[in-house]
Amino acid sequence: MRLEASNVNVRYGSHDAVAQVNLVAEPGEILAILGPNGSGKSTLLRALAGVQRYAGTISWAGQQTDIGYMAQDIASRAVLTAFEVVLLGRMRSLGLRVAAEDLAAAEAAMTEIGVAEIAHRRIGTLSGGQRQLVFIAQVLAGNPRALLLDEPTSALDIAHQLSVLALLRTISRKRGLTTIAVLHDLNAAARFADRLALLRDGRLVGLGLPAEMLTAPHLAAVFDVDVAIDAGSDGHPVVLPLRAVGSDRFHSAGLH
Amino acid sequence: MSAVVTGWHVANRRRASLLALVAVALVASFAVDLATGPAMLSIRAVLLVLTGQSTDPMLMAIVQHLRLPIALMAVIVGATLGVTGMVMQTILNNPLASSYTLGISAGAGFGAALAIVLGASFGLSDDTAVPLAAFAFATLACGIVGGVGRLRGATPELLVLAGIACLFLFQALLSLLQFIASPESLQQIVFWLFGSLQRSTLGKTGVVAGVLVLVLPVLFADAWALTALQLGDERARALGVRVDRLRLRAFVVVSLLTGAAVAFVGTIGFVGLVAPHIARMLVGEDQRHAMPASALVGALLLSAASVASKAIVPGTIFPIGIVTALLGVPFFAWLVLRRGGTT
């Protein structure tokens, strides 16, 4: 499902959280959005998902209902089992009597992500990582044509990060999904995504192949950090952070 | 059938069994409610009247015109408060939300008091004027809260704040009426505010039951959307739920339902607050199960309170609102403490 976004703007009060972003993503493509804290990554993703008001044009070559969006916040007080949460991914076809097809799709998604064994545990009793996997399964259960994922692996251990990103890559390729993910791990993004979008202060400051975007000058400009770039054995760039630059970094970010 | 789906069906059967147990307890409570009262009738005498085998006019009057309407009203109003409490807590994402805490009951109380003070001047009997005015002002309170939500976005925080403002507004107006009311009117107002089933008739019970039957399909049609709302507004939106519309629609529907219930029996707190918590413990928050569970638990609580109101001092019937609060608050505190604050 092709995405075309032009001049997307999201304003919070007098502050432009996203400013004049233009973006195109093709079916089967995986695009990772990278940027420092507060750069507007999640806001842009929410606008693309249609859950955030925006100015400009966002056009998907399909229905809004074909978009599977996974929010960053995985906290939940709901007294629902993991299976019920995944079943909600089938919202659009659920009736008072749940069809066998919906049950099968929810189970298949849980099995695919590897969380079938915790299907009947309450969502509030699961670890952050398990909840994240359950919400990924929920998005997949809806059979979307586009995947919008906000830090989908932030609560996962390194083994799960690798396996989940590899699985999402396989699924995206196999089903021809347009996948856009906000990620913090630059090296994971380099391995997972076909293209990277760099965001700073709400503006798109770079868009291209991982090898083009993950360069020392680019990362210094976007993240205020000195890095060394190595070539990984699989051909992907590997980022080695050296030091933060700019003495007022914490003060300007309000992190003091 | 695979293990996960089988497990889901097993869990659903367990929920259905729990609901059946609550239903059995409700039938037992209803029977005890019918069989007890200041007239000290035997259970056999009550049964004879109900099955049409007794023609004793006094027995028939007591059972058919006093006990049956009261026992039925306890069940219907309890079910109504249970459902409305569950929906309110769900749409406002607030475990303390109920029609009582959102000013709807306060609106009804002010309306009732106004009718008691002014009723005679409109030539209407108290029996007609009080429920009508209570319902009208419950609707007005709901309109104020819903109107604020429509103007400024129906976020849970805004609706709760508007509800609290409504609560204080109508409580202040009620205090003003109590201040200027004659001693006779004041006594009637206070008695209405206690909450009482004693003025129930089969006709009034039918009205509340009718509204409940009309409203339930509307709420059930939104059962999955309400379930999705438990995951938060953003997730629900991403799943295709039109959150603001759902919240306003459900709020208006349950407010009108509450208005119809409290119009006839006065303000009965606690049931709408605690029944949803017990229901959640029994069946979780899939609203297809949670709403009927909350209705059954609410009906059981109010029916049991009706029995207790006659048993506390034999020969006397306590106002049921006092009983629900006196018995309910310690029970609720125990429930919350037992679950470490997460009901």
Image (cartoon, helix red, strand yellow):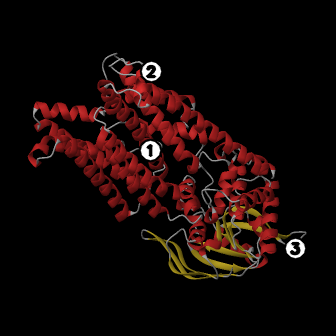
Tell me whether marks 1 and 3 sit on the same chain.
no
Residue at mark 2: B44
Q: Chain of mark 1?
A: B
Q: Is residue B26 left or right of residue B251?
A: right
Q: Position of residue A146 (x, y in %)?
A: 68, 73
How far from the left and from the top, in percent, is residue A167? 81, 64
Between circles 1 and 3, the one closer to the viewer is 1
- Residues packed near mark 2 inside 10 Å, few (<14), some (14 to 19) or many (20 plus): few
Q: Residue at x 33, y 59 (%)?
A: B148
Asked which quadrant contains residue A181, the reply is bottom right
The residue beneath circle 1 is B85
Q: Is residue A115 left or right of residue A34?
A: right
Distance in Å between CA atoms under marks 2 and 1: 37 Å
The image shows residue B89, relative to residue A205, as above or below, that is: above
Q: Quadrant of the N terminus of chain A?
A: bottom right
Image position, residue B238 (x, y; %): 58, 65
Amino acid beneath label 3: Gly
Q: Nearer the viewer, mark 2 or mark 1?
A: 2
Mark 3 secondary-structure assignment:
loop
In the rendered view, does A104 fall on the left or right side of B210? Answer: right
The residue located at (22%, 48%) in the rendering is B133
Circles 1 and 3, Cβ within 8 Å, touching? The answer is no
Which callout, 2 or 3, points to the residue nearer the camera? 2
Q: Which residue is mark 3?
A: A235
